[in-house]
Amino acid sequence: MKKIVLIVTLVIFFLATGCKNTTISKASNNTPKPNKNKIFYEKYEKDCYGNGNSVGNISNYGTACEDTNYIYYSITYGATGIYKMNYDGSNKTKLTSDKAYYLNSDKDFLYYRNVSDEGRLYKINKSSLKTSKLTNDKVFYLNLSKGYLYYQNENDGNKLYKIKTDGSDRQKLNDSYSSYITVVDNYIYYQNETLGNSLYRIKNTGEDDTKLNDDTSIYINVFNDFIYYTNDSDNGTVYKIKNDGSEKQQVDSTSSHYLNFSGNLLYSSDNKRNLFFRINNNNLNKVVFNSNRISKISNINVINSFVFFDGTTNDGNSNYIMKTDGTELRKLQ
């Protein structure tokens, strides 16, 4: 009888041990899938160079940006205001009725040019939705970088300024008409309209203002060590140049405005804005989008799997959104 009890006990023990090992084995093979939102945001961060929006979006009026939870975008036709939505485009929520450009985001606030108040610099708390005016300056080309907001000051001859995100420490950085302002790391790249519309570089402290080319340079983008721009001195075609002013070369011979680099893809529209396309920076392969009879395509902003842009049809001007492959085109409402 004791032998039978011992055998039964051993069988139960080995069965239990076997089940336990099987469970552990299954669990170890259950590798978590990558978080798609995290992948999107990491790509976006690379486009931003640590700033409050991507370089390409700011070059295109900054009508869309994001944080780790939401996409934020501006509607400038119809029901104007700043909105947010989930990464998949669901759960649209209006934050303010302010007509806004140059959206920049940090952890707690959105910063923007408030067209509803003559283009002055504002911020809105993402949680409380309280808005605050930071300065009476009328701003363009707003860039958030390392706790400062850089901008063209329309109140002072369109010169380059910076101010802290709390509205303190306002400083003038140069004495030139400065457009297409792009901040990357410790440098600011811009078009100097006072000195021939050429591409210039200046430190974020206002020192070492340096001319990089002789071209009329607009829609300034930065990708790795190169600056991409529309060269209006050569029929509005796309050029690139090293950030020290060397190795200038033409990238594409199509007249191209509203350049926006996202990842390795360059989005643009032609000079008359009736053609919408993207170029792969590796092989220069060009994809032309079917814009469904939308003309005057402008203000191209790229966020995750979406492209935001403005355009015109027989019904007038509207904001639009589509997927980055050109599908699911619709009005942004």
Image (tube, rainbow, N blue to C red):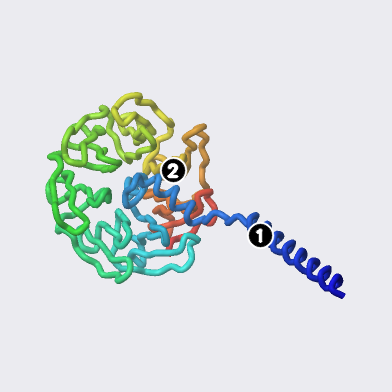
| Residue closer to the observer: 134 or 214 | 134
Q: How far apart are labels 2 and 1 at the CA level? A: 49 Å
> Would residue 296 be seen by someone viewing this image from the given angle?
no
Q: Badges 2 and 1: C-beta atoms under 8 Å apart? A: no
Q: Which residue is mark 2?
A: 267
How far across and down, in percent of the image, does residue 210 sit? 21, 30
Residue 193: image tag: none
- Classed neighbour count for the residue bearing mark 2: other residues with Cα under 10 Å, few (<14), some (14–19), many (≥20): many
Identify the secondary structure beneath mark 1: helix
Label 1, on which residue?
24
Residue 218: percent from left, percent from top: 30, 38
Q: Quadrant of residue 224?
A: top left
In the picture as drawn, the residue positioned furthest to the top comes out as 247
Q: Amino acid at mark 1?
A: Ile
- The image shows residue 209 at horizontal and vertical percentages of 18, 33
The residue closer to the viewer here, 19 or 166, is 19
Q: Earlier in the sequence, mark 2 or mark 1?
A: 1
User: Which mark is nearer the camera, 2 or 1?
Assistant: 1
- 236 vs 32: above or below: above
Indicate the quadrant containing the N terminus: top left, top right, bottom left or bottom right.
bottom right
Residue at image x 36%, y 45%?
A: 56
* Image-quadrant location for residue 212: top left
Residue at (47, 52) in percent of width and height: 40
> Looking at the figure, which quarter contains the C terminus?
bottom left
